[in-house]
Amino acid sequence: MDTGDTAWLLTSSALVLLMTPGLAFFYGGMVRSKSVLNMMMMSLGAAGVVGVLWVLVGYSTAFGTDVGGGLLGAPFEFFGLTGLLGAGVVSGTVPTTVFVAFQAMFGIITVALISGAIADRARFGPWLLFAALWSLLGYFPVAHWVFDLDGKDAAGEVVDPGGWIANRLAAVDFAGGTAVHVNAGAAGLALAIVLGRRVGWPRDRVKPHNLPLVVLGAGLLWFGWFGFNAGSAAAANATAGVTFVNTLVATSAALLAWLLVERLRDGNATTLGAASGIVAGLVGITPACSAVTPLGAIAVGAITGALCALAVGLKYRFGFDDSLDVVGVHLVGGLSGTLLVGLFADDAAPAAVNGLFHGGGVDQLWRQAVGALAVLAYSFAVSLGLGYLVKLTVGFRADEESEVGGIDEAEHAETAYELGAALPGARGHAGPGVTAVLEGSAKS
């Protein structure tokens, strides 16, 4: 065990957990004021559900002994982390419990990401049910495919086979472009289809009710993402340094690229665009951060930022109501970053593979494509089936009255902004002017 590596991975775990409340702010600011609490609760609820399931069966399913030819770990091998609590039980150079904690945060944020596709219209209880089922059947198996590396003995022989994408296919996905972002994006698309369009969409274009919250959320995501990517080195080493720098520069390039697309297309560079560009860049560099040089990272970020800025409009063309652009940012961004490894990978980077532009031909490109498309197809099919199961058994979508009147009140008996308490004359009983303001706010 190395204490420096352990300290870094513990720190990274905390950084990745911070991303979930960061996402709650980001998503919460983008919706209408009458549904902001429901939106934030969907992220917080994901933390509760996945945190418990990960300790019970999630870690075993993702990192237990392979029982399905690279498809699945033994679900009950480490039930409740049995056998992993000893001081001498290590994964690499860190205690296994620290690795367990770090990987748990990935499952939490992945489930939370899906919720943005069904903002403004999902009931909270059924969402928690879907989150539990999807974790078991959607995230945990795919995490095994992508993150579970073969265990080898001193002679280099495989003694503990891992997931098929990471080992047999040998696709590069350093921190979860497929397992997290393509997975969540495909699930978001499926749920958008299952729940259908919001009342009035697309006629009524919903604007973010609080852009400062969106920017705060984007900032927390960027901050936490250094733990997400650099922490995936599982050590305080040169790989962590390279991935840290690549995460910074790719995100910066994506921010600029998104704003450029907005400026050329719409005539304005917006605050929402800047925040969205940050997230797109983070998504794009996630699979590629160990495989490209900083110059390659700039290219990955710029291309992904521009593609996502263009892709968010596809929902209007194809008619699916992806409320907060989970498909346009996470599915498209995850695909972009994963495939661009096949073009920009440079063996000077820690992953030590070459893409098409560095003399590697299409060998790495086809591996990246197969891995990404396999996760997309599997996640979409599982999510569609689970979404309809929840819909047909307990009901998934809020009724029209709750959606129009305010899903926060209907689902949580709360409102985000108690405007009456802050208005002059509101003490005691509200005068006619205050009443008019409150009624107008409720209608909005």
Image (cartoon, grey):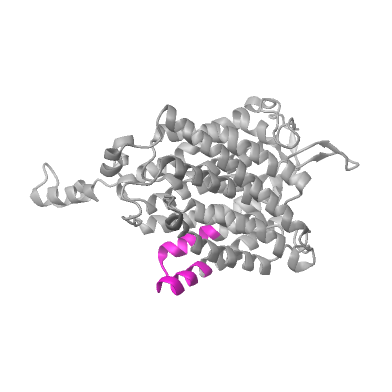
Q: Is residue 422 above or below residue 128?
A: below
Q: Is residue 368 visible?
A: yes
Q: Position of residue 251 (x, y in %)?
A: 56, 63
Residue farthest right in this picture: 155
Residue bounds of the magenta highlight: 257-280
How many discs mark residues in the rendered view? 0
Looking at the image, which is closer to me, 121 or 373? 373
Image side of residue 140 versus residue 221, left or right: right
Residue farthest left in this picture: 432
Q: Is residue 125 above or below residue 434?
A: above
**x 53%, y 32%: residue:** 133
Find residue 158 and report its image quarter.
top right
**x 60%, y 46%: residue:** 376
Q: Is residue 160 above or below residue 34?
A: above
Q: Position of residue 399 (x, y in %)?
A: 31, 36
Looking at the image, which is closer to me, 142 or 30? 142
**x 55%, y 52%: residue:** 331
Q: Is residue 114 above or below residue 259?
A: above
**Dominant secondary-structure state across the stretch colored magenta:** helix
Q: Position of residue 191 (x, y in %)?
A: 47, 42
The N terminus: image quadrant:
top right
Find residue 63 and report its image quarter.
top right
Q: Position of residue 148 (x, y in %)?
A: 72, 41
Answer whether residue 276 is magenta in the image.
yes
